[in-house]
């Protein structure tokens, strides 16, 4: 499977850093067997459901949405606001 679309943004609130991770999507080929299709769907689902770990501190990274722009690392107040926004169940996305 290949990476498709825009990379997804994740952030670690402990380190105040933002990371981009590839977005995986299943691809269909008309010559693939049904077993290969099932295996590929399973792999894509597991990839999208996995938890991302911060490479610096080892803590959990949180999905931020496509339109997230990270504040400066020294701005602790802005990072607390971002964390409260994400923990409320919302993500940064233009539109609705």
Image: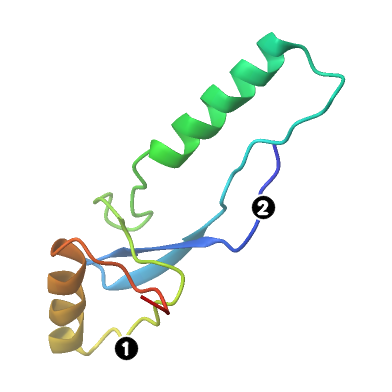
Q: Position of residue 74 (x, y in %)?
A: 24, 88
Which secondary structure lies at badge 1? loop
Query: Which of the two discs, 1 and 2, labels the residue nearer the N terminus?
Result: 2
Q: Is residue 36 left or right of residue 7?
A: right
Residue 4 — which label?
2
Q: Closest to the observer: 92 or 11?
A: 92
Q: Quadrant of the N terminus?
A: top right
Vertical order, 76 against 36 (above or below): below
Q: Is residue 70 left or right of residue 84?
A: right
Q: Quadrant of the C terminus?
A: bottom left
Vertical order, 81 against 44 (above or below): below
Asked if labels 2 and 1 touch by Cβ distance under 8 angstroms, the answer is no
| Residue found at x 19% / y 87% | 78
Name which quarter of the figure residue 6 lies in.
Answer: bottom right
Residue farthest toward the front in the current orientation of the protein: 96
| Residue found at x 84% / y 24% | 30
Residue farthest toward the right in the current orientation of the protein: 31
Residue 24 — which label?
none
| Residue found at x 27% / y 73% | 16
Q: Position of residue 79 (x, y in %)?
A: 20, 80
Q: Residues within 10 Å of mark 2 (few under 14, many from 20)?
A: few
Which secondary structure lies at badge 2? loop
Residue beneath disc 1: 72
Q: Closest to the observer: 74 or 26?
A: 26
Q: Residues within 10 Å of mark 1 (few under 14, many from 20)?
A: few
Spatial separation of the CA atoms under disc 1 and disc 2: 29 Å
Q: Is residue 90 left or right of residue 47?
A: left
Mark 1, mark 2: which one is toward the viewer? 2
Q: Position of residue 35 (x, y in %)?
A: 67, 9
């Amino acid at each position: 499977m290949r990476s498709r679309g825009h990379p997804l943004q994740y952030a670690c609130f402990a380190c105040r850093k933002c990371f981009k991770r590839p977005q995986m999507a299943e691809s269909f080929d008309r010559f693939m067997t049904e077993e290969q299709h099932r295996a590929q769907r399973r792999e894509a689902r597991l990839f999208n459901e996995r938890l991302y770990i911060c490479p610096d501190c080892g803590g959990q990274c949180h999905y931020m949405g496509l339109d997230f722009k990270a504040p400066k690392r020294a701005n602790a107040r802005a990072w607390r606001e971002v964390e409260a926004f994400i923990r409320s169940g919302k993500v940064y996305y233009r539109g609705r």
